[in-house]
Structures are given as C-alpha cells and as structure tokens.
Amino acid sequence: MSKANDEYIPALSYRFLTPFYDFIQKYIVRDVRYKALLIAQANIQAGHHVLDLGCGTGTLAIMAKQTRPAAEVSGLDADPDMLKVANYKSAQMNAPVKFDVGFTNKLPYPDQSFDRVLSSIMIHHLKTPDKWQTAREVYRILKPGGQLHIIDFGKPVTWYGKLLGPLLHKFEEANDNIEGKLPEIFGAPGLKTEILGNFWTFFGDLAFLKGEKV
C-alpha cells in the first residue's frame, strides 16, 4: 500500500469487529469452500515456498499447510491483531506457519523466494496505485515458473453479481475488480494471467485468477 495508506484499515473496517471476522468468513462468506478450491488450483508441491498475501487470521495459509505439510508456508498481513489470531490458530491446529507483519507494496522478502503466492479476498481493499505496486512486488518475489493464485471480486458474471455491481462501484478500491482489470494489473510486470473460474457469494461474484512467471 502507498505511504499514505500505511495507516491500514482493519479488514472489517473497525477493530472491535476483528473477533467476529472468522465467524463472518465461515458462515456468511463461505470462505473455506473457495479457499479449498484456490489451494487445489495452486497445485502446491512438497518443498514449495508459499506466501499467503494479506493473510488475515491465517485460514488460507493454515489450510495450505494442512494440505501440503512438506511445503513451507508464510503469511503476511498489516494488522498485528489479525496475526495474533493467526498464530494462535496455527498452534492449535498444529500447522506451523510463519506469520509476518508487512504491507503488500513493500514485501519484506528477497527476489525469487516463493514458488506460490496466494491471496484471498484482499486485493479489492487496495487502491489502484497500491494494486499496481503489489503486482510488481509479487512478480519480484516469485521464482521463475512460480505462480500467483487469487480469489477476489471480479467482473460480475451472474445476474445477482451484475445487480450488485453498481453498489460495489461506490467503493473506490473495488472498481478495478468489478471492471475486470485484475488480469491486466497483475500481468503488467510480466506474469501470464488468466481467469480460471468464478464463485458466487452473497456479497457478489468472485473470480479465480492465475498468473505464472514465465
């Protein structure tokens, strides 16, 4: 995120809602289902270094570690309160994941250090310049042949999604997603990007994006 946005906004906008985050994700957004599909899409292998970008309370990172225990999984988020929950969940589930505090436009990792970068319902929180800088950072940290896998709001494909589209347009950060620009943004630094499918939620249509560093 840009310097102006280093004062991050919690995922549910208000800190007092953080304890309810997992409940909302599991029972209203159905996140376990689409996160499982994203992990299957990523085809993580033993020995892979995997990063969950904007990991929140760590659900996706922990699921990835449980799916492929021999992979090395890290999660990054700007919210220390979320990461406290993530670390607790990781310990309780015996799924060791390394969680780091940081911003997506200034990733604290060396060049070409990850085989897979995953992101779940985070990119739409970023303003347009931050999306472009995040795309450059993702390209930088991916190894040659490495892949980016995103599930996030995309161009509406269902009648319900198209109905919600104008409402989501009121939120500046979501415009790029709703207009279907994520493949362009993440493809600009050099990733070969494509939309592989969609997922319906109460809050709108999600898109599965794949990007490969060729």
Image: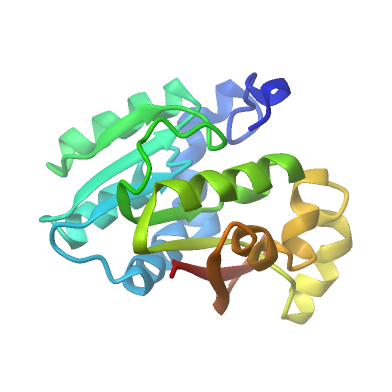
User: Which residue is painted at 21% across and 52% down in the image?
Assistant: 65
- Residue 185, image quadrant: bottom right
Residue 51 on image: x %, y %:
35, 47
How many labels, in total?
A: 0
Residue drawn at x 32%, y 72% as measured from the top left: 40
Q: Where is residue 117 in the image (x, y as percent from the top left)?
A: 40, 54
Q: Where is residue 111 in the image (x, y as percent from the top left)?
A: 38, 42
Q: Where is residue 2 in the image (x, y as percent from the top left)?
A: 68, 29
Q: In which quarter of the image is residue 162?
A: bottom right
42 sits to left or right of 69: right
Residue displayed at 27% across by 56% down = 64
Q: Is residue 119 left or right of residue 166?
A: left
In the image, residue 84 above or below residue 113: above
Quarter of the image for the N terminus: give it: top right
Frontmost residue, 19 versus 168: 168
Q: Is residue 145 left or right of residue 79?
A: left
Whether residue 127 is visible, yes or no, is no
Colour logic: rainbow
Looking at the rendered image, the quarter that the C terminus falls into is bottom left
Query: Considering depth in this image, is 65 or 159 the residue closer to the camera?
Result: 65
Check the image and report above or below for 184 versus 172.
below
Is residue 80 at all visible to an observer of this figure? yes
